[in-house]
Image (spheres, rainbow, N blue to C red):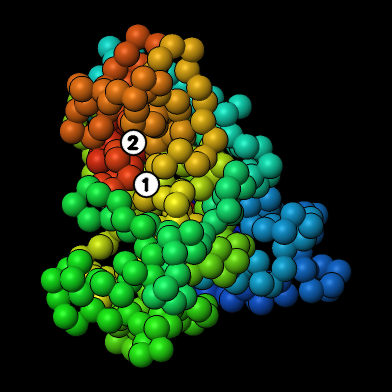
Amino acid sequence: MKYIILLILTVTFLISCKSNQEKKKEQGPQEQRPSSAQLISEMDSNKDGKLSKTEVQGPIANDFANIDINNDGFLTLEELIKVEKNQQNRPPRQSNENKDLSNQINTEAKVVPVNTDYFISENIIGGIQKQTIELNGVETLCYVIKTNSQATEHQMGPWCPRHIEDGMEKAGIWFRDGEVYDVSGHFIANLDEFYSDDKWKLYREDGTIKVTDTEEGCLAAAKPEVEEQYNNYCVECLPEYFKDQVTTFVIPVTPTYLNSTQNFGRGGIGIAFNGVNFDPPAPVHAILAAHTIAPLDDHGGHVNPHGGYHYHAATGSTKEIVQTNSHSPMIGYAIDGFGIFALLDKKGNKPNDLDECGGHFDDTRGYHYHAGQPGENQVIKCLHGLPGYTEIKE
């Protein structure tokens, strides 16, 4: 939320002298802003090393619940530092955030509001809240949904086999040119043939496979610029490394259809009903250049340091909302508030009139998307609605 992002700056202003702007002219550069420790020192009236609701005021009081990560009724130094860190290192929001899209609204398009009853309530942190937020020049009533992005309907993983003789049951899946492949030990052993490149060799002479089996290895390898020592590795990050990350989804309560399409930023492109991110396409070309692969599990998900567990494919493993007719089931919402549905209907047929984003209209569901095939590395291709955004707090 933008209030969290501006929190430290706002609190600094509140506790500064009223004449600060006048002094600035006389004293030169403004003094350094107080640290999180100084903020506690200023406000901690009973000197117990933490802040209660009665000890804070202004924006910090208004956003108390968002900062209180463990919901114990107090703000600790650690929690304030996380807010400060998030302010300095927050990932960028959707690339369209600064565009004024108000002139692109199509008021005649049929849309259906978001139904929060579809979400698995146990996976939502603090319940789903409503807040009016300006999205690309449009004041919009939004749902604010916080999760740890951890699946509950299915096991997360496995991803990488440990030996070239391991079967496909001990690992996940990989994709190329729209096709899905089981990442068995045999698949790993033959990557040089698969990619027609003899530099591929993810296994040792004894047949064991090189896997990032520590958090340190995960952090070094699970990024586009893979550190050299982890070239020729099977990249596997575990959900428990990032289980305390909080992902905030800001999604319009009632989606707004735009005449123009919108590209994705780096944030999540949607949310499954279990609270897990649907993410943009994985940066495959970058990691392949380092002769690494980061398999998805059989459910279409894997883990990285910047988003925790997330999906790049819809494989039918998550909660679905079955439709009354033969239409495919609903699997989540895009970040613009339009529903995402599975690709195939009950008869196994694909829709034949999808637009460039993977969406279309019908009389029951209004505008909505259909997930791409698992091997396409794209759940949906773009947005046709006024986009919300995601934020991740580590």
- Please state which amino acid type lies under the numbered disc 2: Ala
Above or below, comparing residue 213 to residue 73 in the picture: below
Q: What residue type is labelled 1?
A: Ala
**Earlier sequence position, callout 1 versus callout 2:** 1
Please give the count of numbered marks on the rendered protein. 2
Horizontally, is 157 left or right of 99 in the view?
A: right
Tell me the quadrant of the picture where the C terminus can be found. bottom right
Q: Nearer the viewer, residue 6 or 337?
A: 337
- Residue at position x 52%, y 40% in the image: 318
- Left or right of residue 219: residue 266: left
At numbered mark 1, what does the secondary structure look like: helix, strand or loop?
loop
Measuring 45% from the left and 70% from the top, which residue is drawn there?
166
**Residue 286 x, y percent position in the rendering:** 23, 69
Is any atom of residue 66 visible in this view?
Answer: yes
Residue annotated with mark 2: 371
Q: In this view, does 377 lie above or below 305?
A: above
Q: Is mark 2 on a helix, strand or loop?
A: loop
Between 85 and 264, the residue placed more toward the observer is 264
Q: Do the residues labelled 1 and 2 touch (CB within 8 Å)?
A: yes
Quarter of the view holding residue 346: top left
- Horizontal and vertical percent position of residue 143: 52, 35
Out of 169 and 287, give the one closest to the viewer: 169
Q: Check disc 1 and report the residue beneath it.
A: 313
The numbered dot on residue 153 is: none
319 lies left or right of 209: right
- Residue at image position (52%, 74%) is 33
Mark 1, Cα crowd under 10 Å, few <14 / some 14-19 / many 20+, is many
Residue 125 percent across, percent down from the top left: 65, 47
